[in-house]
Image (tube, rainbow, N blue to C red):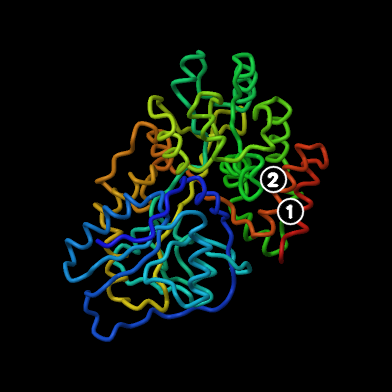
Amino acid sequence: MKIRNMAATSAIVAISALALTSCSGGGGDAPAPSDGEVSGTLTGVFFSGFQETYEKIATAFEEEYPDVTVDFDYQGGDVGQLVMTQMQGGTAPDILTSFPGGDPKDNADNVAPLAANGLIAPLDVTWADDIPEAWASDFTYEGEVYAYPGALQPLSAIYNQTKMEELGLSVPTTLDEVLQLCADAVDAGVYAYAQGLGEAAAGPQMFPFAHTATLLAPEVPDFDEQLAAGEATYPESPWVDIIEIQQDLWDAGCFGEGALGRSREQGATAVAAGDALGIVDVGAVLASISTAGPDNSYVVAAVPATNDGDTFVTALPGFVTTINAKAKNPAAAQAFLEFMGTPEASAIYADGFKSVPVIPNDEYTPTAELEEFAALIADNKGMRLPTLQAEVQSTLNQQLQAMFLGNTTPEGVTESMQSAYKQ
């Protein structure tokens, strides 16, 4: 397998681009190869932080298809933006790294807008019907599957279990216990949650996104649809309660000194070093924390938002894999996407991303850190993230920072989100 342009970087950098946005346009058909022969060179672009995982799958694919030479490009930074630039310039490879879901009113690198604009091809795969219904909309557009779904990662708390045990503390199961953990952490000379509140593109949103699983999704499961129909607004929804909790967390000192100047990468490093007990972020960050603090044990846990002990977990697909609508080798591209959905390849993918396969897979066994998350998914307590338009998401992050500085209120945050919403 040929590898080129391998730029090393932290997984956190790329995952910070997981903006959960979308775009608009009209669909396209899969390019039909002239003879359907699976041979030749297959090109693709992926994030370098997970190069080892993609290489394992590509090597197994080449064994299955010896007439194909896989020539993947591994890049650091915002690989999604790179793909968009390549497509605009006509230089994009056959296989693309994309993001799930999306709102067709936006202009972003998510499945829905890419498919709507005819930039990616529908898939001809045998595993399409195996995608659980709860997650199907993240990978489909107008009834057709456009992406290999990869794995569900938690958007949850990641705790340094070693540090917690050293201090005699335990993972909270209610909101009051979360606030008590913050107080206990301060008394112990550390802080509870190393949120990267200074990273305006994604840092402030993580805690509230985790709380939507319990406070929004079960209460108003069709909130996105109501919002689009003008039947709901952010200021008259559970979003106000969600933002109020963020203010309570800030007032309780949960985020430590200098949180508004901290990046997510710095936050993850603090957890690995034991300076903070945990961080609320996407599950892919666990890989970086484990690398930075290999002698610690870690645990992924849902983030309580109430005191009744009935907590749900936000789950979301990370990177998804799509096919360029103008692929030079569409036959090999379709074969590769079919191969990614096999139990063997799916387990490799999930293990590499420290996540749980979207498509149920008997060959996958969760690691100790992910046992609780996998159990919640199996118990139907995993909730999809609400779809925020790009401008609404940007406004949420900026307004949370403003609220922590004392310049707005929870109600003001949601009013600004509503003003940014495009009907």
Residue 231, given in percent of the width and then of the height, sits at: 72, 59
Using a 10 Å C-alpha cutoff, classify the residue at mark 2 as few (fewer than 14 neighbours), some (14 to 19) or many (20 or more): many
| Residue 29 placement: quadrant | bottom left
Q: Can the viewer see residue 12 in this picture?
A: yes
Please give the residue where the numbered disc 2 appears in the rendered image: 239
Q: Is residue 32 left or right of residue 184?
A: left
Using a 10 Å C-alpha cutoff, classify the residue at mark 1 as few (fewer than 14 neighbours), some (14 to 19) or many (20 or more): many
Q: Residue at x 35, y 64 (%)?
A: 128
Instruction: Verify CB contact (< 8 Å) between mark 1 and mark 2.
Output: yes
Mark 2 secondary-structure assignment: helix
Q: Nearer the viewer, mark 1 or mark 2?
A: 1
Residue extending furthest toward the right: 407
Front in this rendered view, residue 5 or 141: 5
Residue extending furthest toward the bottom: 34
Q: Can the viewer see residue 134 in this picture?
A: no
Q: Residue at x 29, y 54 (%)?
A: 55
Q: Quadrant of the N terminus?
A: bottom left
Residue 164, given in percent of the width and then of the height, sits at: 49, 19
Callout 1, which amino acid?
Met
Callout 2, which amino acid?
Trp
Give the answer, above or below, for where 315 lies relative to 70: above
In the drawing, what numbered circle is on residue 417?
1
Q: Residue at x 62, y 31 (%)?
A: 306
Q: Quadrant of the C terminus?
A: bottom right
Residue 249, given in percent of the width and then of the height, sits at: 68, 30
Give the answer, above or below, for where 265 lies relative to 392: above
